[in-house]
Image (tube, rainbow, N blue to C red):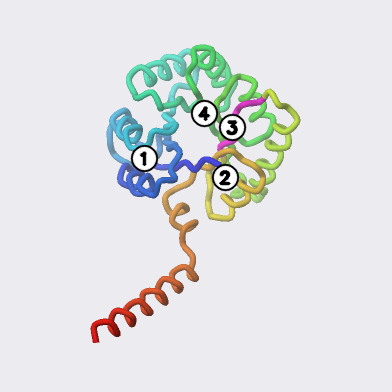
């Protein structure tokens, strides 16, 4: 499974990248706005820190605008930047063209297995189903991941990766792994929570306490 970080905070990316397990980064206009910095500058910095796929989202709503923005982003930014496109009819059309031009895409805001399949058929590199936002409606977001993975299992020709997004807690990540999702993108706090366990802390405290006693005895 690929672990992506969902943020536009460069310092957070440096932190997680230093762990040696970061495979990519997803951004969106809201995250860039929150950073208060220039869009292309931020994405370029991120692409220098992490050599995996970096999603940069278009803001146009029409196919021609998405193509213009997507091509410009690929021309102006590092090679590992991929184009993030909304799951709309116009977005699928843009995805199809960009795919024919060898430009990787991440089709986002996917909320049904049929949307995911349409995006895959258009040539999306990734599809991003939003688990947490489905949970917010009272439904179960993990059901969508299960439906998409079951659909994928029926067709060997599908190469599109399922990138689970809107991750709210560590159990979302574990459930995605068990269902076979290819990728998850999550905020920094989820990375930290996945690595945190009270028994690990307790064990380390015991080891350090015992080692201090050994050193004290050796110095006596």
Q: Is residue 52 above or below residue 209?
A: above
Does the magenta-highlighted stretch encompass residue 159? yes
Please tell me which residue is depicted at 42% across the width and 77% down the height of the picture. 206
State the separation of the CA atoms marked 4 and 3. 9 Å
Q: Residue furthest bottom?
A: 220
Name which of mark 4 and mark 3 comes first in the sequence.
4
Q: Nearer the viewer, mark 4 or mark 3?
A: 3
The residue pinned by badge 3 equals 161
Please tell me which residue is depicted at 47% across the width and 41% down the height of the picture. 4
State the separation of the CA atoms marked 1 and 2. 20 Å
Q: Nearer the viewer, mark 1 or mark 3?
A: 3
Spot occupied by residue 119 in the image (x, y as percentages of width and height): 61, 25
Badge 4: residue crowd in 10 Å (few <14, some 14–19, many ≥20): many
Badge 2: residue crowd in 10 Å (few <14, some 14–19, many ≥20): some
In which quarter of the view is residue 23 placed? Answer: top left
The residue pinned by badge 2 equals 133
Checking the image for residue 106, the label placed there is 4
Q: Nearer the viewer, mark 1 or mark 2?
A: 1
Left or right, residue 214 beside residue 53: left
State the separation of the CA atoms marked 4 and 2. 18 Å
Spot occupied by residue 19 in the image (x, y as percentages of width and height): 39, 49
Name which of mark 4 and mark 2 comes first in the sequence.
4
Q: Quadrant of the N terminus?
A: top right
State the separation of the CA atoms marked 1 and 3. 22 Å
Question: Magenta span covers which residues?
Answer: 158-163
């Amino acid at each position: 499974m690929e672990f992506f970080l969902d943020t536009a905070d460069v310092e957070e990316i440096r932190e997680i990248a230093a762990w040696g397990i970061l495979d990519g980064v997803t951004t969106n206009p809201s995250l860039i706005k929150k950073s208060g910095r220039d869009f292309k500058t931020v994405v370029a910095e991120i692409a220098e820190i992490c050599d995996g796929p970096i999603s940069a989202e278009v803001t146009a709503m029409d196919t021609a605008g998405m193509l213009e923005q997507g091509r410009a982003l690929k021309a102006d930014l590092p090679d590992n930047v991929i184009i993030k496109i909304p799951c709309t009819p116009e977005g699928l059309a843009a995805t199809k063209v960009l795919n024919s031009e060898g430009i990787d895409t991440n089709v986002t805001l996917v909320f049904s297995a049929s949307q995911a399949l349409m995006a895959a058929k258009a040539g999306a590199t990734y599809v991003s189903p939003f688990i947490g936002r489905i949970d917010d409606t009272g439904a179960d977001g993990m059901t969508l991941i299960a439906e998409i993975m079951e659909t994928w299992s029926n067709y060997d020709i599908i190469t599109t990766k399922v990138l689970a997004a809107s991750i709210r807690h560590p159990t979302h990540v574990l459930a995605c792994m068990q269902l076979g999702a290819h990728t998850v993108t999550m905020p920094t706090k989820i990375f930290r929570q996945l690595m945190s366990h009270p028994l690990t802390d307790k064990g380390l405290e015991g080891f350090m306490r015992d080692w201090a006693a050994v050193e004290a005895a050796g110095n006596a």
